[in-house]
Image (cartoon, rainbow, N blue to C red):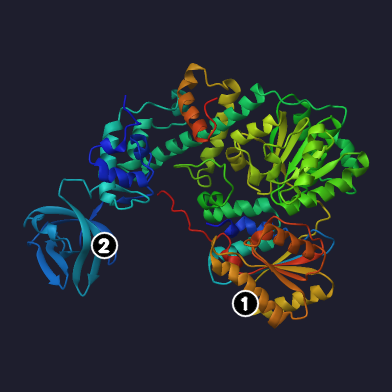
Amino acid sequence: MVDLKKDVKYIKGVGPNRAELLNKLGIFTLQDLITYYPRAYEDRSKPKTLYECADGEVALIEVVATSRIVETRFGRKTMQKLMIGDETANAEAIWFNQTYLKSKFSVGQKYRMYGKIDKKYRKIQIQSPVFDEYGVTQNTGRIIPLYPLTYNLSQNILRKIMENGIKEVYGNLPETLPDYLLKKYSLPSINQATKAIHFPEELKDFQIARTRLVFEELLMTQLALLKLKYHDTKKIKGITFSNKHKIAEMIERFPFKLTNAQIRVLKEIEEDMESPKMMNRLLQGDVGSGKTAVAMCAAYKAVKSGYQAVIMAPTAILATQHLENFEKMLADLNIKCELLISGITKKKKEAILEKLKDGEIDILIGTHAVLEDNVEFKNLGLVVTDEQHRFGVRQRSKIAQKGQNPDVLVMSATPIPRTLALILYGDLDISIIDELPPNRKKIETFAVTKRMQERVDNFIRKQIEEGRQAYIVCPLVEEGEDSGLKSVIELSEKYQKEIFPEYRIQYLHGKMRPKEKDEIMLKFKNHEIDILVSTTVIEVGVDVPNSNIMVIEDAQRFGLARTTSITR
Amino acid sequence: MHKDLDWLGLHQLRGRVGRGEYQSYCILKYEGKSETVRKRMKVMCDTNDGFVISEKDLELRGSGDFFGTMQHGIPEFKIANLFEDMPILKKVQVVAQEIMSKDADLKLPENKLLQRVVNQKLESLGTGTL
């Protein structure tokens, strides 16, 4: 058996200095090394004749040296030139500042070279090629892996180290996938796959190897998540909520009809709640799909069954908004809701904590503050949290300690396809609200360029004259970058001075104190501001039903990320 | 990459309006001639459905960036690319479900091999061995 935990510095060709560089790449052990996969490959196995090569092409040629290296000096730089040729043409190979090459070539000897071909003025040149003596396949004559970052390690050195690493493990790696899976899905063994992902003999070999390694990685992740889920379900006994108090009672209290998707999701939640298993459910729904109503129904059932519920929101102002909505719907049911955010006075906080402990508060709504150690419940039964507070398993046990394994509902406004949700949130059950309320009008969306600026401004003016409000958003370029922040203020000033002097304009950005932000949002909500110029901080925000225009500046910046280079 | 630049963020921003009784509008000002940008703008104009947008997003940029912008707590992959490898992922989910329904503790002799790596995975997910 091979020791995969072996420190990388003991691998042939590494040593302490190179080990340090490898460490920077996250490579500490032999295992890390052999799972440092190439990002791409270069096929240096198919030779061409000088005649066949096109100008600018990167190619492999097989040539004979027809001269010695001639070195020319330009100031501090040197150039090495070697005359070469094959049966179709003569050419020259050139390098810069590679004095050591002088002794590497012998006249009449055959070499393989790989590099960029330049065909101009009837002259053929190959620039800074890598090369081998004919018959050697160190740098040429095969498919070469290209690794992602290499810091100060050249691709050549990393490749050589990798070769030694693979030599050490090949044939000795313990198989990780059961035989029946390998057979059923025609996957190569771990030894074959590990070798071929780094040093494929044919391009198709790496595809086969990659399929197996991807299969393994995804399978192990999915199994781990499922195992976690089953463990929670089977071994942790949760609360069995009463089946006498039905969520349907709450559904009828809403002044509007819930969507079929909401009702379906609530059925899933109610089944979880009435079963002894501990609910661990992700509730996914697009903005405006009515997740809060669902949370309210679940909280209703918990309280009616004699338990407390806690609702966690990502911001204080959202928590406040939740409180308003909950109180509106639940007040005449004698369900007591309370708000716990970091801004409240010490005295008030103490009073809340006291009541919470005595069970006088039924639903606590708040920010992360509700997780603090001094927050004690009488009998916490339901935790509703936001995806941004998504609990790791450790935090989940922290919550569990606050009650007898309360049911947990995680809300997410990130709509992702189900297959992906299964692997990203595989340890949770998943409910999806895939329907918007029917009365919601489509938000008419227009993509415009600078030339339309004036028409856009006129359109905004018309809406504001009718009593509406507008958001103008400009995205920050990068976190901590001042220019984005400045641009919000500048833009706001420009609108105020040059375009809409008659309207009340205010800017808002993420660097403001939370209290300041909340005050501005409140003013906007109360229609004391007509136009809010903001960074994307309003993404999780407050409902302002009177606002009906969203202008997004520099919309092309969204999602403009580096494109991932595909392993190919 | 900053979360602000998440493309889905654009959709979520748009969701700030359209919450009342009034017809609402979203105006996307953009510059440049990039084909991808134009495609994105078209998707935004054509639909209000976040699931459609996120699927198109995945198609246009691949999973690395898609998930790079999401919240923490998401498994990292050394070699898999969730978008490109969707067909494998679908197969794997069926296999995993079958295995777990028969042998949740991975104790059957034929699944013994899986146990070790799965436990390593659990550790890397920050949970310790169960």
> Closer to the N terminus: mark 1 or mark 2?
2
Q: Crowding at label 2, few (<14), some or many (≥20) Cα neighbours within 10 Å? A: some
Label drawn at residue A36: none
Q: CA distance from mark 1 to mark 2?
A: 43 Å
| x then y, percent, for residue A50 | 20, 61
Q: Quadrant of residue A295?
A: top right
Q: Callout 2: helix, strand or loop?
A: strand
Label 1, on which residue?
A450
| x then y, percent, for residue A513 | 66, 60
Q: Is residue A425 visible?
A: yes
| x then y, percent, for residue A380 | 76, 32
> Given the image, on which type of amino acid does mark 2 rest?
Lys
Q: Crowding at label 1, few (<14), some or many (≥20) Cα neighbours within 10 Å? A: few
Q: Quadrant of residue A124?
A: bottom left
Q: Callout 1: helix, strand or loop?
A: helix
Task: Evaluate whether label 1 is on the same chain as label 2.
Answer: yes
Label 2, on which residue?
A116
Q: Is residue B17 visible?
A: no
Q: Is residue A30 left or right of residue A469?
A: left
Q: Quadrant of residue A458?
A: bottom right
Label 1: chain?
A: A
Given residues A151 and A129, the one toward you in this image is: A151
> Given the image, on which type of amino acid does mark 1 rest?
Lys
Image: A72 above or below B76: below
Q: Are marks 1 and 2 in contact (CB under 8 Å)?
A: no
